[in-house]
Amino acid sequence: MKLILDSLLSFRFFVLLYLLPSCLAFQLTTFGPKNYAPDDIVDTTVNTVSPSNGAEHGTDIFNYEYYDDRFHFCQPETIVQQPESLGSVLFGDRLYNSPLELKMLKNTSCIPLCASHMSKPDIQFLKDLISQNYVVHWNIDNLPIATYAGYANPDNYQLTPGFPLGRVTEEGILLYNHYDIIVEYHTSAQNQHRVVGAYVKPVSRESKFENGKPECSTSNSHEVLPDQDDLTFVTSYSVTWKYSTTPWATRWDKYMHGPSNQIRWMFLLYAGIFDIFLIFIVCLILFRTLNRDIDKYNSAFLDQEDVQEDFGWKLVHGDVFRPPRRPMLFSILLGTGAQLLFMTSAIILFAIFGIVAPSRRGSIATAVVALFIVSGFVSGFVSSVSYKVMQGMLRKRNLLLTPFVVPGILLAGALFFNIVFSAKNSSSTVPFTSWLLLIFLYLVFTVPLSFIGSLIGFRSREFVPPVRTNQIPRQIPTQSIWISTASSALIGGAIPFVAILIELYFILDSLWFHPLYFMFGFSFFCFGILITTCVMVSIITVYIQLCTENYNWWWRSFTTPGFCGVYVFVFSIIYWINRISSTSFATTLLYFGYSLMISILVFFLCGSVGFFGSFLFVNKIYGSIKID
Ligand SMILES: *[C@@H]1O[C@H](CO)[C@@H](O)[C@H](O)[C@H]1NC(C)=O
């Protein structure tokens, strides 16, 4: 039995844990190149209407379904929802077929699509969205269509998916009702063409009718949204095919490179240098001090003289492994932190190896779901091992609570947001069936996996602290205010936060405005820097604390780096003021709800990582002094 458990816990098992979700991600999203012969119909789908950054007077954060009645977009004969993975649905994609008909290599000039009638309230709704810079999302051959910006400087221009609904001008608010579509193709073999670029130049043209039938207008005047009247307008489009030398494999690169990349790399470079500096300082100071301290201590001990000269961290050896208060809560938080660490690092690894990518629609979201399921094991295991180390007695309760506390809070939060979404008729509302599926997966996989993890954790080898704990706790000398829990959290938490500051700004941008277009190269470095900084900060704090003969280091090693999460929340308030500043109550509620949730997760992640580092550190330093 022991053998099985050991081998289960071995490296291979963890590799398996990583592989399982990646298989899932693979299976759900196999996207290969699609070849079209001339005149073949090219797949065209519509996605949501979503906010984009750069609105002057603030913006809401709701997505809307493309065929929401209020838009009056032209519809195909029958609207068919396109199959999507659970992850894709959870993260907001809503794909439907499109009324456009695009034929490979067939240029068309101005085809009227349909005429629509819009009532006053809907015009007002549209005006609101246009002044908030809302954009429409279409896909051509699974490639998100972007606003055409010419070829002025393709190297220094980042494509962002979507094109605006209209434009605010002095004339009034214009409705874009004609789409100049430009599709780039690459020829892979004779009569085998692939779509490698998709753009739209949206135009506003005054509608034209002939004998009551919609006509394609070439008028120079614009379709202005009226203030008082209803509006009947014609939608039209034209298609131009252009040859491109971009091969299919790199057609996504244009979305990934942008002018801001240089700033980001520069900042990460500085943060990295700062981080290495921090590690260096920690190693230098700590190991020099430790070596000297340990030598002195050991020799003093052996010589039986100057023993009373003892001071600092060595003095508290009889208390340093005294279990902390609230071991139940602490171990559950650590389990969650480990779970988050596992998930985040796995996602970033998958992305680096190209297993998940924005070009595989929904693959990232699917991997998140799959990892969340599998990671139940990690949380159970870490929680139970920590609980055991902290000498908690209520093992059964720990086993039962671990999979429910934090996911429970998250699920409750998500359900609440969902109610707000559906009240707003937003497409971000997760359908009931997806909820059922998610809860089913959670109950059937995550919870039992967490139990298994807990059982294995409780059966793992007994933790023997390197020094014995005294019966009677030592008196803790009065502490200076500068090294109190609060001030060390305020100072210590700021350090990892500053290290990721700029990147955080871009992450929030992509979270609110371009979901899932993260750039994983950045995330990889940023995450690495965050983790190491948290560990370093935690170790330094614990060392200083132990030197002042305060042995209550457990919680502090968690809260100090964890406080970074509080800064993240403060930052999201600043971000709100600068980028969103909506007056809508629902948006405010949602934004701050989500931000709070993210900040809490960052708190758990950073705190746990810091604690693990400090725990190893404390074990190491007390393991190296000789006490009989
Ligand atoms: C379509 O029109 C563009 C621009 O006028 C032209 O460069 C291209 O060759 C045309 N394509 C085909 C297949 O006719």
Image (cartoon, rainbow, N blue to C red):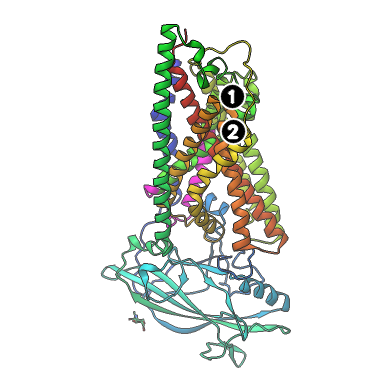
From the top left corner, tell me how far across and down residue 239 is, in percent.
43, 79
Whether residue 350 is visible, yes or no, is no
Q: Amino acid at mark 1?
A: Asn
Dot 2 alpha-carbon crowd within 10 angstroms: few under 14, some 14 to 19, many 20 or more:
some
Residue indicated by mark 1: 550
Q: Are marks 2 and 1 in contact (CB under 8 Å)?
A: yes
Residue at mark 1: C-beta within 8 A of ligand 1? no
Magenta-drawn segment? 352-377
Res. 256 image quadrant = bottom left
Mark 1 or mark 2, which is nearer the start of the sequence?
Answer: 2
163 horizontally vs 251: left or right: right
Q: Residue at x 71, y 83 (%)?
A: 227
Q: Is residue 219 visible?
A: yes
Give the residue at x 37% y 70%: 154
361 on left or right of 133: left
Q: Quadrant of residue 233?
A: bottom right
Question: In the figure, 185 relative to 231: above or below?
Answer: above
Residue reaching furthest bottom? 211
Q: Find out whether residue 371 is within the magenta segment.
A: yes
Q: Which quadrant does ligand 1 occupy?
A: bottom left
Q: Element type at marker 2? A: helix
**Is residue 235 in the magenta section?**
no
Q: Label 1's element? A: loop
Q: Tell me residue 75's x, y (percent).
A: 58, 73
The residue singled out by tag 2 in the image is: 483
Q: Quadrant of residue 259?
A: bottom left
- Residue type of the residue flagged with mark 2: Ile
- Please report the residue visible at 64 percent of the width from the left and 29 percent of the height from the top: 329
Measured as percent of width and height from the top left, residue 48 is found at 57, 64
**Residue furthest left as drawn:** 190
**Real-space CA distance between mark 2 and mark 1, rounded to the nearest whole angstrom:** 10 Å
Q: Which mark is residue 199?
A: none
